[in-house]
Image: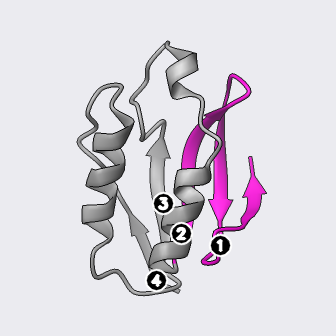
């Protein structure tokens, strides 16, 4: 199994910019790789929970597009969670 830990230079509270950076990091990555992202990678450690809330739809789409397994730190229901998506974009685990 290939594992890639991705550390981003996060743009504070700018989801589109951070997802674009993530996509650049994933260029050329092998299918089925497990990609591990830091918690709150999409916004940084903001107290703006309305902005930080994330359904995971973007992560699911990225997992499906790149055919990777993606472990992402997301804020859901005002809680910080680690969510795992498989290479089809299906959520398969949450902590």
> Which residue is at a point 38% across and 37% down the rendered structure image?
15
Q: Is residue 31 found left or right of 77 in the rendered image?
A: left
- Percent of width and height locating residue 7: 32, 51
Q: Does dot 1 land on a helix, a strand or a loop?
A: loop
Residue that mark 3 sits on: 36
- Numbered marks: total: 4
Instruction: Check if mark 2's residue and mark 3's residue have beta carbons within 8 Å.
Output: no
Q: Nearer the viewer, residue 1 or 21?
A: 21
Spatial separation of the CA atoms under disc 1 and disc 3: 12 Å
Residue wearing tag 4: 2
Circle 1/circle 2 CB separation < 8 Å: yes
Mark 1 or 3: in front is 1
Between discs 4 and 1, the one toward the N terminus: 4
Q: Position of residue 91 (x, y in %)?
A: 73, 61
Magenta stretch, overall SS: strand
- For the residues labelled 2 and 3, the Cα–Cα distance comes to 11 Å
Whole-percent x and y of residue 72? 54, 51
Q: Nearer the viewer, mark 2 or mark 3?
A: 2
According to the image, label 1 marks what residue?
86
Closer to the N terminus: mark 1 or mark 3?
3
Q: Earlier in the sequence, mark 2 or mark 4?
A: 4
Q: Residue 63's spot in the image, x, y percent?
A: 53, 69
- Is residue 32 positioned above or below 34 on the image? below
Kindly report the distance in space between the C-alpha atoms of the residues bearing marks 2 and 4: 15 Å
Q: Is residue 64 shown in magenta? A: no
Q: Quadrant of residue 80?
A: top right
Q: As displayed, is residue 9 above or below residue 60?
A: above
Report the Cα–Cα distance between label 3 and label 4. 11 Å
Residue depicted at 52% across the width and 27% down the height? 52
Secondary structure under the numbered disc 4 in the rendered image: loop
| SS state under label 3 | strand
């Amino acid at each position: 199994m290939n594992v890639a830990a991705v550390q981003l230079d996060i743009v504070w509270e700018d989801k589109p910019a951070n997802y674009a950076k993530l996509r650049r990091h994933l260029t050329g990555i092998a299918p089925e790789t497990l990609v591990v992202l830091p918690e709150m990678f999409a916004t940084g450690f903001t107290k703006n929970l309305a902005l930080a809330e994330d359904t995971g739809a973007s992560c699911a789409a990225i997992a499906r597009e790149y055919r990777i397994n993606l472990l992402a730190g997301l804020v859901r229901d005002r809680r910080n969670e680690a969510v795992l998506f498989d290479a089809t974009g299906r959520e398969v685990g949450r902590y």
